[in-house]
Image: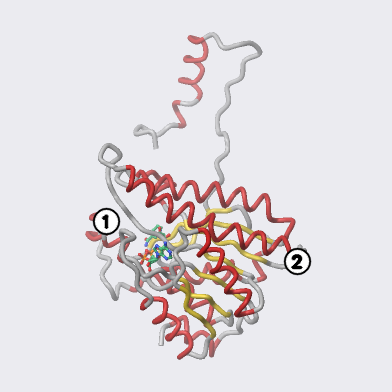
Amino acid sequence: MSSAMSERASESSALDGRVAVVTGAGRGIGAGIARLLAARGAAVVVNDLGVELDGSGADTGPAAQVVDEITAAGGTAIADGADVSDAEQAEALVRTAVEKFGKLDVLVNVAGILRDRMIFNLSEQEWDDVIRVHLKGHFNTTKPAAAYWREQRNPEGHYRLINFTSVSGLHGAPGQPNYAAAKMGIVGLTYSCANALGRYGVTANAISPGAATRMTASIPGERRAGTSAGNDERSPDNIAPIVGYIASEASDWLTGQVVGARGYEVHLYNTPAPIRHVVSANPWEPERLADLVERTFKPAVAPNGR
Ligand SMILES: NC(=O)c1ccc[n+]([C@@H]2O[C@H](COP(=O)([O-])OP(=O)(O)OC[C@H]3O[C@@H](n4cnc5c(N)ncnc54)[C@H](O)[C@@H]3O)[C@@H](O)[C@H]2O)c1
Protein backbone atom coordinates (compact mmCIF):
# COMPACT_ATOMS: atom_id res chain seq x y z
CA MET A 1 0.00 0.00 0.00
CA SER A 2 1.41 3.43 -0.87
CA SER A 3 1.92 6.06 1.82
CA ALA A 4 -0.87 8.09 0.22
CA MET A 5 -3.33 5.24 0.68
CA SER A 6 -2.35 4.53 4.26
CA GLU A 7 -3.30 8.13 5.09
CA ARG A 8 -6.95 7.25 4.63
CA ALA A 9 -7.01 5.28 7.84
CA SER A 10 -5.06 7.77 9.94
CA GLU A 11 -6.16 11.24 8.82
CA SER A 12 -9.44 13.03 8.52
CA SER A 13 -10.54 12.93 4.91
CA ALA A 14 -10.20 16.52 3.76
CA LEU A 15 -11.61 15.72 0.32
CA ASP A 16 -14.65 13.65 1.31
CA GLY A 17 -17.45 14.22 -1.19
CA ARG A 18 -15.23 16.08 -3.69
CA VAL A 19 -15.06 14.95 -7.33
CA ALA A 20 -11.81 15.32 -9.28
CA VAL A 21 -10.54 14.75 -12.81
CA VAL A 22 -6.79 14.16 -13.04
CA THR A 23 -5.32 14.01 -16.56
CA GLY A 24 -2.14 12.03 -17.22
CA ALA A 25 -2.87 10.08 -14.03
CA GLY A 26 -1.75 6.66 -15.25
CA ARG A 27 1.90 7.31 -14.40
CA GLY A 28 4.34 9.50 -12.55
CA ILE A 29 3.14 12.66 -10.84
CA GLY A 30 -0.49 12.34 -11.99
CA ALA A 31 -0.79 8.81 -10.60
CA GLY A 32 0.49 9.99 -7.21
CA ILE A 33 -2.06 12.82 -7.23
CA ALA A 34 -4.96 10.52 -8.17
CA ARG A 35 -4.01 8.09 -5.37
CA LEU A 36 -3.73 10.84 -2.75
CA LEU A 37 -6.98 12.59 -3.75
CA ALA A 38 -8.80 9.24 -3.57
CA ALA A 39 -7.09 8.33 -0.28
CA ARG A 40 -8.37 11.59 1.18
CA GLY A 41 -11.96 10.89 0.12
CA ALA A 42 -12.39 12.30 -3.40
CA ALA A 43 -14.01 10.35 -6.24
CA VAL A 44 -11.45 10.50 -9.04
CA VAL A 45 -11.63 10.18 -12.82
CA VAL A 46 -8.19 8.79 -13.67
CA ASN A 47 -7.48 9.95 -17.21
CA ASP A 48 -4.54 8.71 -19.24
CA LEU A 49 -4.03 8.03 -22.92
CA GLY A 50 -1.18 5.69 -22.04
CA VAL A 51 1.31 7.08 -24.55
CA GLU A 52 5.09 6.86 -24.81
CA LEU A 53 7.12 9.83 -23.59
CA ASP A 54 7.08 11.32 -27.12
CA GLY A 55 3.28 11.00 -27.35
CA SER A 56 3.21 7.95 -29.62
CA GLY A 57 1.00 4.91 -29.05
CA ALA A 58 -1.92 4.45 -26.65
CA ASP A 59 -2.59 2.01 -23.82
CA THR A 60 -5.52 1.77 -21.41
CA GLY A 61 -3.34 -0.23 -18.98
CA PRO A 62 -1.74 2.57 -16.88
CA ALA A 63 -5.05 4.32 -16.02
CA ALA A 64 -6.74 0.98 -15.28
CA GLN A 65 -3.89 -0.04 -12.98
CA VAL A 66 -4.13 3.18 -10.93
CA VAL A 67 -7.90 2.70 -10.63
CA ASP A 68 -7.30 -0.88 -9.43
CA GLU A 69 -4.87 0.38 -6.79
CA ILE A 70 -7.33 3.03 -5.60
CA THR A 71 -10.31 0.70 -5.42
CA ALA A 72 -8.24 -2.03 -3.71
CA ALA A 73 -7.43 0.55 -1.01
CA GLY A 74 -11.13 1.36 -0.56
CA GLY A 75 -11.23 4.50 -2.70
CA THR A 76 -13.50 5.52 -5.57
CA ALA A 77 -12.16 5.95 -9.10
CA ILE A 78 -12.90 5.24 -12.74
CA ALA A 79 -10.50 5.08 -15.66
CA ASP A 80 -10.76 7.27 -18.74
CA GLY A 81 -8.69 7.00 -21.90
CA ALA A 82 -9.38 10.41 -23.47
CA ASP A 83 -6.69 12.17 -25.47
CA VAL A 84 -6.68 15.64 -23.87
CA SER A 85 -5.27 17.17 -27.05
CA ASP A 86 -8.59 16.35 -28.75
CA ALA A 87 -11.25 18.93 -27.79
CA GLU A 88 -14.21 16.54 -28.13
CA GLN A 89 -12.56 13.80 -26.07
CA ALA A 90 -11.52 16.31 -23.39
CA GLU A 91 -15.06 17.65 -23.17
CA ALA A 92 -16.38 14.11 -22.83
CA LEU A 93 -13.86 13.54 -20.02
CA VAL A 94 -15.27 16.47 -18.04
CA ARG A 95 -18.81 15.25 -18.76
CA THR A 96 -17.88 11.79 -17.49
CA ALA A 97 -17.11 13.19 -14.03
CA VAL A 98 -20.50 14.92 -13.84
CA GLU A 99 -22.39 11.90 -15.23
CA LYS A 100 -20.65 9.25 -13.12
CA PHE A 101 -20.11 11.17 -9.87
CA GLY A 102 -22.78 13.89 -10.08
CA LYS A 103 -20.51 16.94 -10.24
CA LEU A 104 -16.98 18.28 -10.77
CA ASP A 105 -15.05 20.15 -8.07
CA VAL A 106 -11.40 19.79 -9.09
CA LEU A 107 -9.63 19.61 -12.45
CA VAL A 108 -5.92 18.73 -12.35
CA ASN A 109 -4.19 19.04 -15.73
CA VAL A 110 -1.06 16.87 -15.57
CA ALA A 111 -0.87 15.07 -18.94
CA GLY A 112 2.19 15.85 -21.02
CA ILE A 113 4.85 14.67 -23.46
CA LEU A 114 8.37 15.73 -24.50
CA ARG A 115 10.00 16.30 -27.91
CA ASP A 116 13.31 17.83 -26.86
CA ARG A 117 15.47 19.55 -29.46
CA MET A 118 17.56 22.71 -29.72
CA ILE A 119 15.63 25.55 -31.36
CA PHE A 120 17.71 25.40 -34.56
CA ASN A 121 16.87 21.69 -35.01
CA LEU A 122 13.24 21.71 -33.82
CA SER A 123 10.77 20.57 -36.48
CA GLU A 124 7.37 22.14 -36.96
CA GLN A 125 5.82 18.79 -36.01
CA GLU A 126 7.77 18.67 -32.73
CA TRP A 127 6.67 22.22 -31.94
CA ASP A 128 3.02 21.48 -32.80
CA ASP A 129 2.83 18.18 -30.90
CA VAL A 130 4.14 19.60 -27.63
CA ILE A 131 1.99 22.74 -27.83
CA ARG A 132 -1.04 20.57 -28.73
CA VAL A 133 -0.72 18.16 -25.80
CA HIS A 134 0.34 20.64 -23.09
CA LEU A 135 -1.14 24.05 -23.93
CA LYS A 136 -4.14 23.06 -26.04
CA GLY A 137 -4.63 20.03 -23.78
CA HIS A 138 -5.00 22.38 -20.80
CA PHE A 139 -7.46 24.56 -22.76
CA ASN A 140 -9.46 21.54 -23.94
CA THR A 141 -10.31 20.37 -20.42
CA THR A 142 -10.43 23.80 -18.80
CA LYS A 143 -13.02 25.27 -21.15
CA PRO A 144 -15.80 22.71 -20.50
CA ALA A 145 -14.96 22.66 -16.77
CA ALA A 146 -15.17 26.47 -16.61
CA ALA A 147 -18.47 26.44 -18.53
CA TYR A 148 -19.79 23.85 -16.07
CA TRP A 149 -18.66 25.86 -13.03
CA ARG A 150 -20.18 29.05 -14.45
CA GLU A 151 -23.49 27.22 -14.92
CA GLN A 152 -23.52 26.20 -11.26
CA ARG A 153 -23.93 29.86 -10.19
CA ASN A 154 -22.22 29.03 -6.90
CA PRO A 155 -19.57 31.58 -5.85
CA GLU A 156 -18.99 29.44 -2.73
CA GLY A 157 -18.36 26.33 -4.84
CA HIS A 158 -14.66 25.92 -3.87
CA TYR A 159 -13.96 24.79 -7.42
CA ARG A 160 -10.30 24.18 -8.32
CA LEU A 161 -8.29 24.40 -11.52
CA ILE A 162 -4.77 23.05 -10.93
CA ASN A 163 -2.43 23.23 -13.92
CA PHE A 164 1.11 21.97 -14.50
CA THR A 165 3.94 24.27 -15.56
CA SER A 166 7.70 23.67 -15.35
CA VAL A 167 11.04 25.26 -14.48
CA SER A 168 11.78 24.51 -18.13
CA GLY A 169 9.61 27.53 -18.96
CA LEU A 170 10.08 29.55 -15.77
CA HIS A 171 13.91 29.35 -16.09
CA GLY A 172 14.17 28.75 -19.87
CA ALA A 173 15.64 25.26 -20.52
CA PRO A 174 17.82 25.68 -23.64
CA GLY A 175 17.02 22.26 -25.13
CA GLN A 176 13.24 22.46 -24.70
CA PRO A 177 11.98 25.51 -26.63
CA ASN A 178 8.61 23.92 -27.50
CA TYR A 179 8.02 22.61 -23.98
CA ALA A 180 9.23 25.85 -22.32
CA ALA A 181 6.84 27.87 -24.49
CA ALA A 182 3.91 25.53 -23.77
CA LYS A 183 4.60 25.60 -20.04
CA MET A 184 4.77 29.43 -19.93
CA GLY A 185 1.58 29.52 -22.00
CA ILE A 186 0.02 27.45 -19.25
CA VAL A 187 1.11 30.08 -16.69
CA GLY A 188 -0.64 32.80 -18.72
CA LEU A 189 -3.73 30.61 -19.07
CA THR A 190 -3.71 30.04 -15.31
CA TYR A 191 -3.44 33.79 -14.53
CA SER A 192 -6.26 34.52 -16.99
CA CYS A 193 -8.52 31.83 -15.52
CA ALA A 194 -7.81 33.03 -11.97
CA ASN A 195 -8.93 36.54 -12.95
CA ALA A 196 -11.92 35.35 -14.98
CA LEU A 197 -13.35 32.58 -12.82
CA GLY A 198 -13.00 33.85 -9.23
CA ARG A 199 -16.54 35.23 -9.34
CA TYR A 200 -17.79 31.71 -10.14
CA GLY A 201 -16.12 30.20 -7.08
CA VAL A 202 -13.07 28.87 -8.95
CA THR A 203 -9.41 29.24 -7.98
CA ALA A 204 -6.70 28.62 -10.59
CA ASN A 205 -3.08 27.83 -9.79
CA ALA A 206 -0.12 26.19 -11.52
CA ILE A 207 2.28 23.66 -10.00
CA SER A 208 5.93 23.57 -11.07
CA PRO A 209 7.01 20.08 -10.03
CA GLY A 210 10.33 18.30 -9.78
CA ALA A 211 10.39 14.50 -9.44
CA ALA A 212 12.05 11.40 -10.81
CA THR A 213 9.77 10.05 -13.54
CA ARG A 214 10.38 8.75 -17.04
CA MET A 215 10.16 12.39 -18.12
CA THR A 216 13.18 13.51 -16.05
CA ALA A 217 15.00 10.24 -16.80
CA SER A 218 15.19 11.48 -20.40
CA ILE A 219 17.23 14.56 -19.35
CA PRO A 220 21.00 13.80 -19.07
CA GLY A 221 21.63 16.16 -16.09
CA GLU A 222 18.73 14.64 -14.18
CA ARG A 223 20.05 11.13 -14.81
CA ARG A 224 23.39 12.16 -13.36
CA ALA A 225 21.60 13.61 -10.30
CA GLY A 226 20.62 10.08 -9.31
CA THR A 227 16.92 9.69 -9.94
CA SER A 228 16.61 5.94 -9.69
CA ALA A 229 13.48 4.26 -8.41
CA GLY A 230 13.57 4.01 -4.65
CA ASN A 231 15.09 7.48 -4.26
CA ASP A 232 12.29 8.60 -1.95
CA GLU A 233 12.92 12.34 -1.93
CA ARG A 234 12.62 12.42 -5.74
CA SER A 235 9.46 10.27 -5.71
CA PRO A 236 6.61 11.73 -7.83
CA ASP A 237 4.34 11.00 -4.86
CA ASN A 238 5.92 14.02 -3.12
CA ILE A 239 4.08 16.40 -5.46
CA ALA A 240 0.65 15.09 -4.40
CA PRO A 241 0.33 16.58 -0.87
CA ILE A 242 0.34 20.23 -1.99
CA VAL A 243 -2.09 19.37 -4.81
CA GLY A 244 -4.28 17.65 -2.20
CA TYR A 245 -4.28 20.83 -0.12
CA ILE A 246 -5.08 23.09 -3.08
CA ALA A 247 -7.88 20.67 -4.08
CA SER A 248 -9.48 21.08 -0.65
CA GLU A 249 -12.07 23.69 0.31
CA ALA A 250 -9.52 25.28 2.66
CA SER A 251 -7.45 26.85 -0.12
CA ASP A 252 -9.93 29.56 -1.24
CA TRP A 253 -7.32 32.24 -0.47
CA LEU A 254 -4.82 30.84 -3.00
CA THR A 255 -5.37 31.78 -6.63
CA GLY A 256 -3.40 33.03 -9.63
CA GLN A 257 -0.16 31.59 -8.25
CA VAL A 258 2.68 29.33 -9.33
CA VAL A 259 3.63 26.87 -6.60
CA GLY A 260 6.83 24.84 -6.87
CA ALA A 261 7.12 21.35 -5.36
CA ARG A 262 10.12 19.06 -5.38
CA GLY A 263 11.20 16.52 -2.82
CA TYR A 264 10.06 17.67 0.59
CA GLU A 265 10.08 21.36 -0.41
CA VAL A 266 7.18 23.52 -1.55
CA HIS A 267 7.73 27.10 -2.68
CA LEU A 268 5.69 30.08 -3.85
CA TYR A 269 6.92 31.87 -6.98
CA ASN A 270 6.64 35.61 -7.39
CA THR A 271 4.40 37.04 -10.08
CA PRO A 272 6.16 39.05 -12.82
CA ALA A 273 6.13 42.75 -11.97
CA PRO A 274 8.24 45.73 -13.12
CA ILE A 275 11.34 46.09 -10.93
CA ARG A 276 13.06 49.15 -12.47
CA HIS A 277 11.55 52.21 -14.16
CA VAL A 278 12.79 55.03 -16.33
CA VAL A 279 10.32 57.72 -17.39
CA SER A 280 10.50 60.69 -19.71
CA ALA A 281 8.10 63.61 -20.00
CA ASN A 282 8.72 63.69 -23.77
CA PRO A 283 9.56 61.20 -26.57
CA TRP A 284 12.87 59.45 -25.80
CA GLU A 285 16.07 60.83 -27.17
CA PRO A 286 17.87 57.53 -28.03
CA GLU A 287 21.25 58.28 -26.39
CA ARG A 288 19.58 59.48 -23.19
CA LEU A 289 17.40 56.35 -23.05
CA ALA A 290 20.43 54.10 -23.64
CA ASP A 291 22.33 55.84 -20.83
CA LEU A 292 19.40 55.59 -18.40
CA VAL A 293 18.58 51.91 -19.05
CA GLU A 294 22.26 50.97 -18.74
CA ARG A 295 22.55 52.76 -15.40
CA THR A 296 19.13 51.68 -14.07
CA PHE A 297 18.40 48.21 -15.53
CA LYS A 298 21.87 46.73 -15.98
CA PRO A 299 22.60 46.22 -12.26
CA ALA A 300 19.38 44.17 -12.03
CA VAL A 301 20.20 41.86 -14.97
CA ALA A 302 22.25 38.69 -14.41
CA PRO A 303 25.37 38.36 -16.63
CA ASN A 304 23.83 35.64 -18.83
CA GLY A 305 20.50 37.46 -19.07
CA ARG A 306 18.68 35.05 -16.74
N1 LIG B 1 8.82 15.04 -13.62
C1 LIG B 1 9.24 16.28 -13.46
O1 LIG B 1 10.24 16.56 -12.78
C2 LIG B 1 8.48 17.41 -14.11
C3 LIG B 1 9.09 18.67 -14.11
C4 LIG B 1 8.40 19.74 -14.64
C5 LIG B 1 7.10 19.56 -15.12
N2 LIG B 1 6.54 18.31 -15.13
C6 LIG B 1 5.18 18.18 -15.64
O2 LIG B 1 4.43 17.36 -14.76
C7 LIG B 1 3.47 16.61 -15.51
C8 LIG B 1 3.64 15.11 -15.23
O3 LIG B 1 4.90 14.69 -15.65
P1 LIG B 1 5.51 13.25 -15.29
O4 LIG B 1 6.95 13.48 -15.03
O5 LIG B 1 4.65 12.56 -14.30
O6 LIG B 1 5.41 12.53 -16.74
P2 LIG B 1 4.99 11.02 -17.17
O7 LIG B 1 5.45 10.86 -18.56
O8 LIG B 1 5.43 10.06 -16.13
O9 LIG B 1 3.39 11.07 -17.12
C9 LIG B 1 2.64 11.82 -18.07
C10 LIG B 1 1.38 11.04 -18.39
O10 LIG B 1 0.59 11.83 -19.31
C11 LIG B 1 -0.02 10.91 -20.22
N3 LIG B 1 -0.38 11.63 -21.45
C12 LIG B 1 0.46 12.14 -22.38
N4 LIG B 1 -0.24 12.68 -23.39
C13 LIG B 1 -1.56 12.54 -23.09
C14 LIG B 1 -2.75 12.92 -23.74
N5 LIG B 1 -2.73 13.55 -24.93
N6 LIG B 1 -3.94 12.66 -23.14
C15 LIG B 1 -3.96 12.00 -21.94
N7 LIG B 1 -2.86 11.60 -21.29
C16 LIG B 1 -1.66 11.87 -21.86
C17 LIG B 1 1.03 9.85 -20.46
O11 LIG B 1 0.47 8.64 -20.97
C18 LIG B 1 1.66 9.69 -19.08
O12 LIG B 1 1.10 8.63 -18.35
C19 LIG B 1 3.68 16.99 -16.98
O13 LIG B 1 2.80 18.04 -17.33
C20 LIG B 1 5.09 17.49 -16.99
O14 LIG B 1 5.34 18.37 -18.07
C21 LIG B 1 7.22 17.24 -14.64
- The answer to whether residue 267 of the structure is visible from this angle is no
Q: Ligand 1 shows up in which quadrant of the image?
A: bottom left
In the image, what residue occupies the spot 35% across and 32% down?
303
* Mark 1 burial class by Cα count in 10 Å: few <14, some 14-19, many 20+: few
**Count of marks overlaid on the render:** 2
- Residue 284, horizontal then vertical, whole percent: 56, 12
- The answer to whether residue 236 of the structure is visible from this angle is yes
Q: In which image quadrant can residue 42 be found?
A: bottom right
In the image, what residue occupies the spot 48% across and 88% down?
71
Q: Quadrant of the N terminus?
A: bottom left
Residue 266 or 36: which is nearer the viewer? 36
Q: Which residue is mark 2?
A: 156
| Cβ–Cβ under 8 Å for marks 2 and 1 | no
In the image, what residue occupies the spot 67% across and 49% down?
195
Q: In which image quadrant can residue 133 be found?
A: bottom left
Helix, strand or loop status at disc 1: loop
Q: Which residue is mark 1?
A: 219
Helix, strand or loop status at disc 2: loop
**Farthest front residue?**
88
